[in-house]
Amino acid sequence: MRIRERWRDSTRFQDVGTAVATFLAGLAFNLVGLTGVWTLSPVQEAPSWWHTVLLAIGCLGMLGKRRHPLLALAVGVAVTAVDGLIGGSVALILVLFDVIFSVGLFASARARTAVTTAVFVVIGTASVVGGLAAGEFRVAAFIGLNLTTLLFVPLWWSANLRQQRQLGLLDAERSAREAVLAERAAMARDLHDVIAAHLSTTAIHSGAALARPADSDRDRATLRAVRTSSLAALEEMRSMIMLLRADDPAAADPTLPGGLDRLPDLVTAARAGGLRIETELREVPGLPAIAGHTVYRIVREALTNAAKHAPGSDVRLDVRPAGDLVTVTVTNTLTGGAALDHRALSSGTGLTSLRERAALLGGELTAGHDGETFTVRATLPRHPSASGS
């Protein structure tokens, strides 16, 4: 397994491995007598070990095929030509095939065009000359087919691989762009929900203050709650806008403005708005920021809804760990009094967005009437399998 991983991660290891494998295969061919295959070679009495020496030189040249493909091709052509003069061998055909393939894969477009043109010239010239010398068209066709297999097929093969790689890169870039657009759309929806929730809280506090008789201490507490909500809205809006404007949202500051440590602030603001809240906030160690932010969003939405639709109600807030999960339960009584909401205060999408966010994290959220109470209950994994904004 370690060798396989190194082969996949190291191009140098791949080149050395290919060169060594080619040398060993060529050496085996030489040992079984696959030398002297060209009967018209001018030198037929050369020692057989010369073929192995030329094979070693060609394999050494293969080591530079990635950085200097034309130089590797020149070495391969030179040793193949010398090998042909002393009778030729099948081993050098392996070297020549590999260096031509490398030109098609690693050389520049101009170099590939030049080599392809030279290959067609060699194939055509050799076919015509061979056919005229033998006086038979069959010989010309035979030479042309064999040289096409040896010289052109590696160029065609490498062109296909190069095209597949380019298509793969284009597909990966398109997928990345689509993922960024989808993430930014999700953040834009979140931004709407965040600002809507804070503005609703501000409107509820101010409406409650206007509905009650003047009281300087109580009115100042209301103003403090309004200011706290406004500052929180600005803080969250700034954080999300920075993410939306970032070229790479994943590389932007991942700090989220709301977490479990901010839950007491939500409770304080809700009490200032007239809710009577009993809390059970247990520590959830090791909770990721995204999960903590989702808990914060759920509690804020539930308390905002209680203040809008059941002002002055009794609320019980419970956040606790449950094994590998964290549970959030917000229950409020149904007061039956006149709600302080205006149609502009409720977009009707808050709980829907939170259900979607909980599902993305691998959890679930339910909300509904339970007798004389309204309950929002969420269960989230403490180690989410998906990430959100």
Image (cartoon, grey):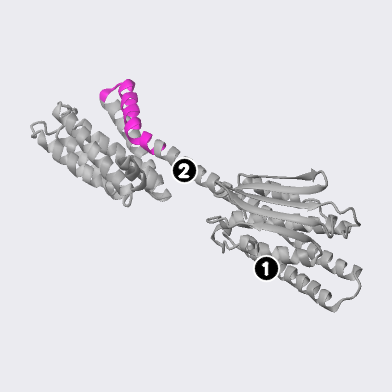
Q: Residue at x 79, y 48 (%)?
A: 374
Query: Could you say whether the residue bearing mark 1 is in a helix, strand or loop?
Result: helix
- Magenta-drawn stretch contains 150: yes
Query: Could you say whether the residue bearing mark 2 is in a helix, strand or loop?
Result: helix
Magenta segment's dominant SS is helix
Sort mark 2 into few (<14), some (14-19) or many (20+) by Cα contacts within 10 Å.
few
Which residue, given by chain and number where applicable, does mark 2 sit on? 165
Residue 169 picture location, percent across and down: 50, 46
Residue 260 picture location, percent across and down: 62, 60
Q: Is residue 219 left or right of residue 190?
A: right
- Kindly identify which numbered label has been placed on residue 216: none
User: In the rendered image, which quarter contains the N terminus?
Assistant: top left
Sort mark 1 into few (<14), some (14-19) or many (20+) by Cα contacts within 10 Å.
some
Q: Residue at x 14, y 40 (%)?
A: 53
Q: Residue at x 40, y 50 (%)?
A: 108
Q: Which residues are magenta?
A: 134-156
Q: Quadrant of residue 335?
A: bottom right
Vertical placement of residue 139 versus 125, above or below: above
- Depth check, front residue: 70 or 197: 197
Which residue, given by chain and number where applicable, does mark 1 sit on? 235
